[in-house]
Amino acid sequence: MRLIHFTLQEYLQAHPELFDRPHAAMAETCLSYLNSRQVKALIYNPFSDFRGTPFLNYSSLYWGRHAKRDLSDCAKPLALNLFGDCSDRISTKILLVWYYPRCNSDRPFFSGLHCASLFGIDELVTCFIEVEGCDINGIDYIGSAPLVWAAKNGYEGVVRILLGRDNISPDRPDEYGETPLCWATSNGHEGVVEILLGRDDVNPDQPDKYGRTPLWCAAKGGHEEVVKILLGRDVNPNQPDKYGRTPLWCAAWNGHEGVVKLLLGRDEASPGKPDIYSQVPLLCAAANGHTGV
């Protein structure tokens, strides 16, 4: 973006102090707008065209991005007020449909704690936890608890805050059976994986409803450091999913040489174990042209 009048642009660049804490100001502006009577009165329609109200769309999707960068004292009560009746707000439905286009907007439960965990805003997570009646293990419209959102996005600070509560359930799966550890390993968030595995009540071998273990997820994504961490916890390197695909099978199929080496370094690894279609890891690597594997 640039300004048409370059003299003004030069002036603004020469005086950055005119924009003190820009992200805090943007977060306050977005939240003030979303808390206005006019916006609160709007009813969400999945066929709505938001091109005529671009700031509604922007505020709903990005207020949290700005708040994560810089959260002011003024923005905190605005965020708490926004989620007082979150499930009825158009801004919440816009946010959910953005992340999950197939979201059923008729049942869009998504608490303030879920949203703060999604954006990774430590201070807001702490505020929402203290709100009376807050369910730290509550599930949203897709069956995910706040810890799942934090682990999925790699927000170590939020994960530590949530795990610091006595009533937290760190191994609670979502509707697909994926635990916070599964999501952290799938996305290669080493720090979150280390934090979760520091708990005695987190099972490092817990499969989802498709039989995919955290090691399976890490191997498929080629996350070598995460694979190292999990192998250090003596997990089963041969645990297949419901289609018979082992972590080694997935790494070979996707050409992740480093992960393949790590898995083959385990004596109990079975390099010739086929899936339910009789495809062994070597066949998978050859079929996809992964010469190194």
Image (tube, grey):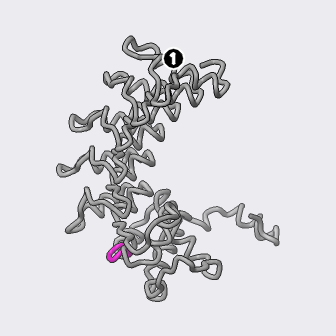
Q: Is residue 193 magenta?
A: no
x%, y% of residue 134? 24, 64
The image quadrant where one finds the C terminus is: top right
Q: What is the secondary structure assignment of the residue under circle 1?
A: helix
**Depicted 165 relative to depicted 113: above or below:** above
Q: Is residue 21 left or right of residue 177?
A: right
Q: Nearer the viewer, residue 178 or 56?
A: 178
Which residue shows up at 33% across the image and 25% down it? 235
Which residue shows up at 62% across the image and 68% down it? 18
x%, y% of residue 160? 31, 45
Q: Main secondary structure of the magenta part?
A: loop
Which residue shows up at 51% across the image and 74% down it? 29
Which residue shows up at 56% across the image and 19% down it? 282
Q: Residues within 10 Å of mark 1 (few under 14, many from 20)?
A: some
x%, y% of residue 202? 26, 37
Toward which corner of the image does residue 290 lie, by quadrant?
Answer: top right
**Depicted 76 relative to depicted 51: above or below:** above
Q: Nearer the viewer, residue 175 or 234?
A: 175
Q: Is residue 169 left or right of residue 280?
A: left
**Depicted 282 relative to depicted 70: above or below:** above
Where are the magenta residues, as a range?
82-86
Q: Is residue 130 left or right of residue 174?
A: left
| Outermost residue toward the top in this view | 267
x%, y% of residue 230? 37, 27
Residue type pointed to by label 1:
Lys
Residue wearing tag 1:
261
**Depicted 149 relative to depicted 223: above or below:** below
| Outermost residue toward the left in this view | 166
